[in-house]
Amino acid sequence: MRLRSAMMYDMKLQIRHGFYYAYVLIAAAYIVLLRSLPLDIRETVGTVITFSDPSVLGFFFIGGLVLLEKGQNIYDNLFVTPYKPEEYIISKTLSLTLLSVVTSCIIHLSAFGLHPNLFLFLLGVTMTSIFFTLLGLGLAVRCQTLNGFFLMSTVYTFVFVLPLVDVIGVWTTPLFYFIPAKASLMMIQSPFNPLGTGQMIYAIGTLTAWIGIAWMWTRFSFRKFITLQMGGGDPQ
């Protein structure tokens, strides 16, 4: 019940800050762009757009939200209540992921229509958005300013989005299989390049492992840079 209320509050907050309106405009622009492209190019561009925008945008949006709340000293009052840091992390992550998934689904269906692998595509978007939102949240709590966050984010995102160069045909290497974006892109491309059983196990397993790592790192970062900085100890 508390988590559901927190998610509803976060969604209202995102609407108030214009996230939903921004996504509507972005989605409309992408649909127009994709529908104007030839089908062979459209598939590659659609993959890049789905990965880099609706999925990864949560990374930057969560950074802005966290730094806004830090500047308003919201945490000092928030965590003297029964509300747990873990619930805060989950609420923020799931509310932004929902927005990413809905947007990606609308863009994909408008540009490509219904595909048999739509579920795997949406699962890829969901897991990618969860990973990058957790990563962005964990980084944001370590930063004091928005400029600092954007500076640090270039280092983090550069490494994690490297497999995009494989999609556009610039460079490929087996090392990409150790980066979660490789698994993300395989699932996002599945409507155009169906995956075998082994590939699906690799993609889902890799993203699950990286989400677990991101969760532990974000939880540790939140406690170190928010909870303990409040002088209130480490609530359980």
Image (spheres, helix red, strand yellow):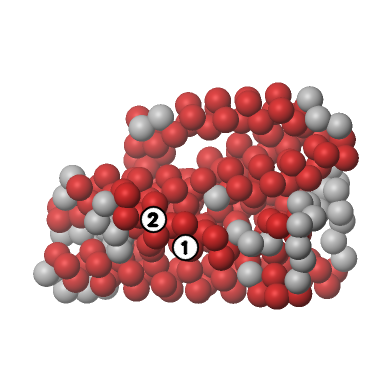
Give the vertical position of 31 relative to 224 (above or below). Answer: above
- The amino acid pointed to by label 1 is Val
Q: Looking at this view, is 32 or 159 the one in front?
A: 159
Asked whether residue 72 appears in the rendered view, the answer is yes
Q: What element carries label 2?
A: helix
Residue toward you, 174 or 35: 174
Q: Say left or right for 186 vs 162.
A: right
Q: Residue placed at 73% from the left, 41% from the top?
A: 46
The answer to whether 78 is drawn above or below residue 25 in the figure is: below
Disc 2 residue type (three-letter): Leu
Q: Is 231 displayed left or right of 58 in the figure?
A: left
Tell me which residue sits at (81%, 30%) in the image.
Answer: 37
How far, Cα to Cα, is label 2 from label 1?
A: 7 Å
* SS at mark 1 in the image: helix
Q: Report which quarter residue 169 is drawn in.
A: bottom right
Q: Position of residue 92 (x, y in %)?
A: 40, 51
Q: Which numbered dot is residue 99?
A: none
Q: In this view, does 136 lie to the left or right of 36?
A: left
Q: Where is residue 230 in the image (x, y as percent from the top left)?
A: 14, 65
Residue 91 makes an appearance in the image: no
- Residue 151 is marked as 2
Q: Where is residue 203 in the image (x, y as percent from the top left)?
A: 72, 67
Q: Mark 1 points at which residue?
A: 155
Mark 2 in CB contact with mark 1 (< 8 angstroms): yes
State the residue at coordinates (68%, 62%).
Answer: 163
Q: Quadrant of the C terminus?
A: bottom left
Q: Give coordinates of residue 214: x percent, y percent.
A: 48, 69
From this view, report whether residue 1 is shown above or below residue 34. Answer: below
Q: Residues within 10 Å of mark 2 (few under 14, many from 20)?
A: few
Question: Residue lying farthest front?
Answer: 170
| Residue 130 or residue 136, whichever sits in front | 136
